Image (cartoon, grey):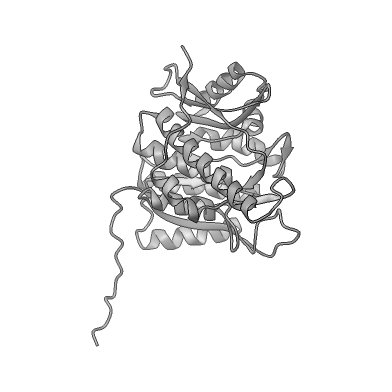
Amino acid sequence: MALPPLLSLAIPSETGRVLSIQSHTVQGYVGNKSAVFPLQLLGYDVDPINSVQFSNHTGYPTFKGQVLNGDQLWDIIEGLEANNLLYYTHLLTGYIGSVSFLEKVLQVVDKLRAINPELVYVCDPVMGDDGKLYVPLELVSVYREKVVPVASMLTPNQFEAELLTGLSITSEQKGQEACNILHNGGPSKVVITSINIDGNLLLIGSHQKARGQSPEQFRIMIPKIPAYFTGTGDLMTSLLLGWSNRYPDDLDKAAELAVSSLQALLARTLKDYQRAGYDCKSSSLEIRLIQSQGDICNPEVKYKAERYSD
């Protein structure tokens, strides 16, 4: 029997290689479980680092598992570096629960950009929703002062955009202003993924194609679904990464594709739970990710972007 070669070799990715640092659950779809599979379907090589490994998401009555600390994260990065495996086209981050871990992620950004200065860092600054913080308050200033300046794309929800900018987003104009403030802080692409204004739900996207230039801004109206789902923000950000890389100059087109995929998946999830006899208003629903592969790869664009005039 022939002996295996002494050295292993990873072939460079032709489509893009994403390092995704997020949570992981054994059962259900949040964090990396929501983000990795869609990106793979869209043609990307994705290397996940699980910031936590839990039995299930924390919305259940109990959960068990382990939390990765900053030193353990750095051990993994050093292992990759020792084997010349740290060339990435994209970094994707989601929920991060401590300042020390977030500070270590910032060191990861620096290290990856030293190897590939063109690295695209897509950050979902998960801090809370509906006026309620999910994370320690001290994380807000770290995101605002240190993460925003190094991010390429930010995907906050309405509450998170308010935390990052200090604005109260009570109108579409305020949403546009929030995007402008974030552009001034660093990222060229900003997508506020969900904004409630006067009973309407919408997404506002903004792309500043050159520093100092007025950004191209748009909105997409989103239907309200009478149910609560987990993992949707993680999925949405991964779809935005995937499609915006394919259409780098057309953030509005990328957002149309991402929103249309997500809405088709949510409609299927709701239908499947209703068919199974569940009360969809009484608990959060696990998304039907695997069953929605077609909607991820080839979404029918039903939700169109409307450009704001300059």
**Coordinates of residue 120 in the picture (x, y in percent):** 41, 40
Taking the spot 59% from the left edge, 19% from the top edge, the residue there is 172
Taking the spot 41% from the left edge, 45% from the top edge, the residue there is 90
- Can residue 95 be seen here? The reply is no
Quadrant (top left, top right, bottom left, bottom right) of the N terminus: bottom left
Of all residues, the one furthest to the bottom in this rendering is 1
- Is residue 163 left or right of 154 when viewed as pictured? right
| Quadrant of residue 53 within the rendered picture | bottom right
Of all residues, the one furthest to the top in this rendering is 310
In the displayed structure, would residue 91 be above or below residue 190? below
Of all residues, the one furthest to the left in this rendering is 2
- Can residue 299 be seen here? The reply is yes
Name the foreground residue: 157 vs 1: 157
- Is residue 136 left or right of 31 when viewed as pictured? right
Name the foreground residue: 273 vs 30: 273
**Coordinates of residue 13 in the picture (x, y in percent):** 31, 53
In the displayed structure, would residue 172 be above or below residue 53? above
**Coordinates of residue 30 in the picture (x, y in percent):** 58, 52
**Callout count:** 0
Name the foreground residue: 267 vs 141: 267
**Coordinates of residue 167 in the picture (x, y in percent):** 66, 22
